[in-house]
Image (cartoon, rainbow, N blue to C red):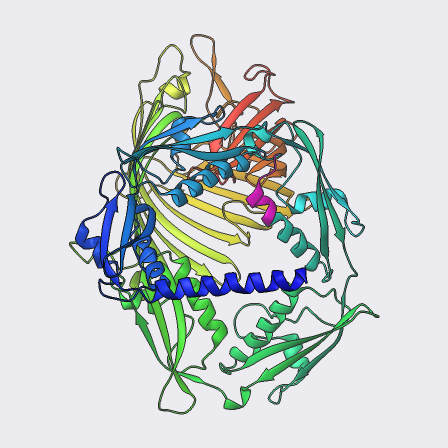
Amino acid sequence: MKFVVRRWTCFVLILCSLVTAYGQASQTIEKIEVRHIGPEAASESLIRGNIRIKEGDTYTRTSVDDDVRNLYATGLFYNIQVAMEPGEKGIKLVYVLQGKPVLSEINIEGNQKYSRKKILKKVSSKTGDPLDERKLFADAQEIQKMYQKSGYQRTEVKYVLNIEESAGRGSATFEIKEAPKIKIEDVQFIGAEAFKQRKLRKAIKTRRHWFLSWITGSGVLKDDQFQEDKETLADFYRQAGYIDFEIQDIKYDYVSPNKMIIRFFVDEGQQYKVGNVELKGNKEFKAEEIRNGIISVGTPIRMKMLEGETFTPKGLSEDIEAIRDFYGSRGYVDTWVRAIKNPNTERGTMDLVYQIMDEEKGKSFIEKIEIRGNTKTKDKVLRRELAVSPGETFDMVRVKRSKSILEQMQYFDKVETEKEDTDVPNRKNLIIDVEEGTTGHLELGAGFSSIDSLFGFVGYREGNFDLFNPPYFRGGGQKLRIGVTIGLRRKNYEISFTEPWFLGRRLALGVDLYHSELNYFSDVYDLTQTGGRLSLTRALPYNFSASVSYTLENISIDDVDPFEAPLVIQQEEGSTLVSKVGAGITYDTRNNAVSPSRGQKTELLTELAGGPLGAEADFYKLELRTFWYFPGFWEGHTWEIIGKSGVVEAYDDSPRVHLFDRFFLGGVTSLRGYRYRTVGPHEQAPNGNFEPVGGNTFWMGSVEYSIPIIERLKFALFYDIGNVYADSYDYDFSEYSDNWGVGIRLNIPRLGPLRLDYGIPIRHDDRFTSDSGKFQFSVGFTRDY
């Protein structure tokens, strides 16, 4: 009985509610009124413009809700309420609006690690703007991320508001609860058997804390980096054939309040090998031809994912591209390749089927080549670099190479290629779209080296210069560089111009004009060089290049100290006009000109001075330089082996080879345990001191082993040996100087590669050099001297 009563009671209450709601819904809106709390945030007309319900309409709750959303969407209001009041003939709607207060002040509390100024750089909210809690919340998150990226993982940040409603303003305070930085004591991989722990740790960027972490920024947990590391670790395993690899869990064990151990719990799965490999749809070519992958340009691209090889996603993608290149190099530009993977978990193999489609359309040929977007660069400058021409087979490999060449010119921010159908069967147009970039660069900076001390430089470099296109002088593909260097021990002024296609041929013409005042050769005299140089350089097949040059310069030796300079140097005082021709051949297979790890660069250089224009120096010079680079014992390690030798000899009854054309050793570019130019023959001055005077024959060798510490830092161990002899062809390998040492190689963004070496002499002439080590500092990783 009680249950029945309760049911009827509920029913009556619900019925009464529905009747009440119906009564409200059927009421007419007699009047709409707007009231403000605090200062008005908007005009009456703007507010009513966003209220769609009108006086005389029948009241509906959904219409009022829509109006409230419209008003909030203006971004002007902090709070909106709608009240209903009874009227004579209906109801009155009252919109009660509180405008967003103006953000009058931003406070920071609890910050010890970062200054207020640095924190405010992460804050997008500004004083004077309407107070926006969504922006304040995002700002708090950004501040917290800044702390977390620096290893302060448990730092908490929140914002607190203080609003003065009557004044229409408010302040926001970011309350920061800083937590101590937690250092990573170890990173472990539980369940990993295929690779050593050390190798897995090197695969990711989240590393253990070590004594150089204050420089590298490593050794602390950074959320963004750690998320990337999880994918990097998975990709590392997949590229080794462990396709089913999975990170099952990650645990953070805090061994102390400021130290933690990160443990990855992993399931490696099994390593997949390639099973059966099948090609389908290859009607034009045999499977064996495609596997061998001979293409028209460059080295053959052979398929890697063959039976028995470790299966990797990267290898699969490369094989798909290799098949496409095979067809594309033969003009089958519409060929598509789809790979079907069939894993066999029992055998641990991945069967592959390459489905080749659409090659039946036949070969395509290039009808015409159209270049678009080159508003500054002349059309011929681009066309002469292309590896394809109209009328030829539409070779997609050569098209890719052409695109790569245009990108390497660094004239354009973007280069895109596409094929365009024509009305002629099997004829297509090649469309090249380019977007002109900035090719002129102003160079400003300062530097320091152990040779020429402190210096500053200013220069301008234009990579797309055109001498015959005034007043803009751009678009001709020529190179121009103007530079001025002023230092404590040298002054240098130079203009360099290069025309890479002289007389319409792939022949580089170089013109150099220079004036140098060099005070770092010696403390007992100054050297000044003023002159010009013309050169022609031609690239030859098989990584060879050849060059010829002509140089005319005036060399002055001034301010010779009669008390500290030996007689042979005093005899050199004055100006000498030098006219010389040079020729050289270079073989270069290095994989990188800035920081090579493989290949070699070998040069044979010759010079012959004398002849016309009243030249006062008669000599010939022969020089052989070779630089070899090999991979070291572990990944990233590099061997550098250098050998160099040269001979200079006077001819035509010339009494001697001038001081400035002799050979010297010592310093950052040769024997690093000795001061600059101090290894070799010396002469005694009137004051009893010995001054280096150089020699006519020299040889040197160097071995260096470099070890990567982090991405931009390397450690090096080296040994240098060599000597300089007074007479030409006077080799005596029993007399030499050598040294060993250590160094670092640091690649700083926007500054470039720097090298710092400390060389320690081993065997040397005690009269001229000491046993103490020498610091050598220079710019650049290689020593192309």
Q: Position of residue 501 (x, y in %)?
A: 33, 61
Query: Among all residues in the image, which is located at the extreme right?
Result: 346
- Classify residue 155 as left or right of residue 550: right
Q: Is residue 146 above or below residue 288?
A: above
Residue 33 visible: yes
Closer to us: 570 or 771: 771
- The rendered magenta stretch, by its main secondary structure, is classed as helix
Front-most of residues 485 and 134: 134
In the rendering, at what x and y percent does residue 590 appear? 55, 51
Q: Nearer the viewer, residue 622 or 780?
A: 780
Residue at coordinates 49% horizontally, 41% vertically from top-left? 784
Q: Is residue 711 left or right of residue 146?
A: right
- Residue 294: x %, y % from top left: 60, 75
> Taking the image as drawn, is residue 655 in sight?
no
Relative to 120, 722 lies left or right: right
Residue range of the region highlighted in magenta in the rendering: 220-227
Q: Position of residue 1 (x, y in %)?
A: 68, 63
Task: Please tell me how many numbered marks the rendered image carries.
Answer: 0
